Image (cartoon, rainbow, N blue to C red):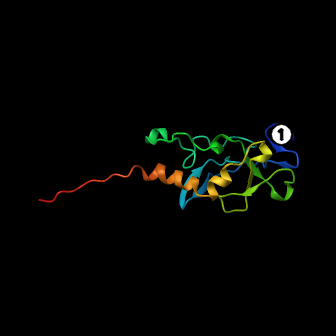
Amino acid sequence: MADVSANTGREGCQCLIQILSAPQIAVIYDKKYEYEASYGWQGCKSYDVNRAPLCEPHSKLELNDDQPPDFCTSEWCYVNKSACTTAAYMPSAFFDDGVFYSYETCNSTDTFTKCYENGACKERVHSIYAGPICAFVMIVL
C-alpha cells in the first residue's frame, strides 16, 4: 500500500490543497446545494458525513433504511489528473469545472462512482425528499 502522509494523498497523486473564498455550489440531480469552500480541497477527509442530499441520515425521515451509503464516511480529495499516476480518479459529478476526485489516493474504496452512475444514489435522494406516498379520498357531498 502506498504511503499516505499527513492526509495529503499518495505520492504520485497528491491531494490539491486550496483555500477558496466562496462556498461551492453543487448541482445534484438538477438541484443546487451550497457546500463550504473547503469541500474536497483540504486533503484526505470524510467530506460527506451527514451531507445532503446523498449522505443525509434517513432515520429522521422515518424510512426503513437509515444507513447512508458506504462512501459517506470514506476519505477522498480533489487531485490534479495530469499529475496523478498512482491512484484512480474521476471527474466531479457535482461541479462542472474540470475538477477530479480520488478515493484511492486516500486509501479508500470508491463506492460513490458506482452508486451515482447506476442510479442507486438518485433513488436514495428521491426517497428522502419525495417522502412517503400518501393517499387520501375526498368526499364531495
Q: Is residue 90 visible?
A: yes
Specify the quadrant that holds the N terminus. Answer: top right
In the displayed structure, does residue 57 sit left or right of residue 102? left
User: Residue at 52% of width from left, 41% of height from top?
Assistant: 57
Specify the quadrant that holds the C terminus. Answer: bottom left
User: Residue at 54% of width from left, 62% of height from top?
Assistant: 30
In the image, farthest residue toward the top: 6
Percent coordinates x, y for residue 15 in the rendering: 79, 47
Q: In this rendered view, identify the residue nearer to me: 45 or 34.
A: 45
Percent coordinates x, y for residue 125 in the rendering: 52, 52
Judge the density around disc 1: few (<14), some (14-19), many (≥20) Cα neighbours within 10 Å: some
Per the image, label 1 sits on a secondary structure element best described as loop
Q: In this rendered view, identify the residue nearer to me: 134 or 100.
A: 134
In the displayed structure, does residue 58 sit left or right of residue 71? left
Q: In this rendered view, identify the residue nearer to me: 14 or 17.
A: 14
Q: For the residue marked with disc 1, what is the amino acid?
A: Val
User: Residue at 88% of width from left, 49% of height from top?
Assistant: 12
Q: Give the image quarter of residue 2.
A: top right
Quickly name the residue at label 1: 4
Percent coordinates x, y for residue 85 in the rendering: 87, 54
